[in-house]
Image (spheres, grey):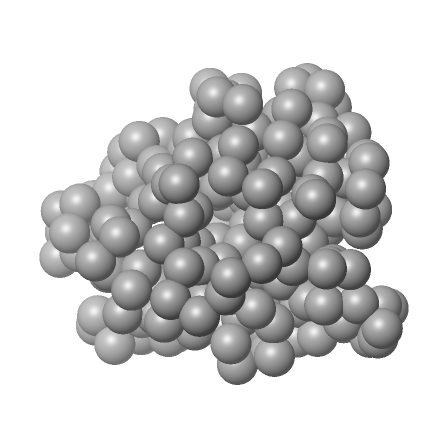
Amino acid sequence: MCYNPRMESVIKNPIIMLDFDGVVADSLEVYFSEFTRACSEMGFTRLNSREAFLKLFEGNVVRQLFWAGFPMYRIRRLLRTFAPRIAEAHRRVGPFAEMPEVVRDLAAAYPVYVITSNATDAILDFLLRHNICGIRDVLGSDKERSKIKKIRSIMRRHPDLTPCYIGDTKGDMREARHAGAIPIAVAWGWHTVAKLIEGKPQLIVHDPQALKKIFLP
């Protein structure tokens, strides 16, 4: 099932760029737990509610942290504390049902990339463990922090194809549009459908198999 305000047919000749957390990986509970623990250890509990945590993903996360009251030196310290915990926690994270099969099928037909704020090596390990094959490249935060720049770098590799970015947050939708890609939202991720609509997606997909209907004739 798809929410489709402006598009009536299959997207032809796409480059498919996937966010990782909330699209492929069911990681919200693990991330929320580890993030709030790190904040508490730093004496910063303002973000320890689920609502405050999810609000960070309405835009650029570092900028949202700054606006929430974190000075830059504390943001850097938080990220240093948080990163190794997430690397370890990835072993407790699994994929959403049907997503490994869906990604494999899409990657057999079109160029598929993962563009994420997560660490590249952690994503590669996850893909290997769950037999998610065919991904052309993974662009994590260690390669470039800006999703906009990463989306545009993939677009330059495939100038004749239709760029599509699939994400699960309002911030993902805003960054995809800013980069010049078609923003496609999934309803099983971190943000609610109402919050996703604020980001002006071109499509909202309500189940993994619907992704195949968008791209595969």
**As drawn, is 144 to the left or to the right of 116?**
right
| Residue at x 39% of width, y 41% of height | 1
The x, y position of residue 168, in whole percent, is: 41, 51
The answer to which image quadrant residue 202 occupies is: bottom left
**Is 35 displayed left or right of 133 in the figure?**
left
For the C terminus, the image quarter is top right
Question: Picture quarter containing residue 189?
Answer: top left
Q: Nearer the viewer, residue 105 or 91?
A: 105
Q: Is residue 115 left or right of residue 82?
A: right
Against 170, is 156 above or below? below
The front one of 109 and 22 is 109
Q: Residue at x 13, y 57 (%)?
A: 46
Residue 63: x and y in percent read 37, 75
Does any portion of residue 186 appear in the rendered image?
A: no
Residue at image coords 41%, 48%: 2
Name above or below for residue 102 compared with residue 168: above
Residue 66 horizontal/vertical position (percent): 31, 74
Q: Position of residue 94 (x, y in %)?
A: 50, 22
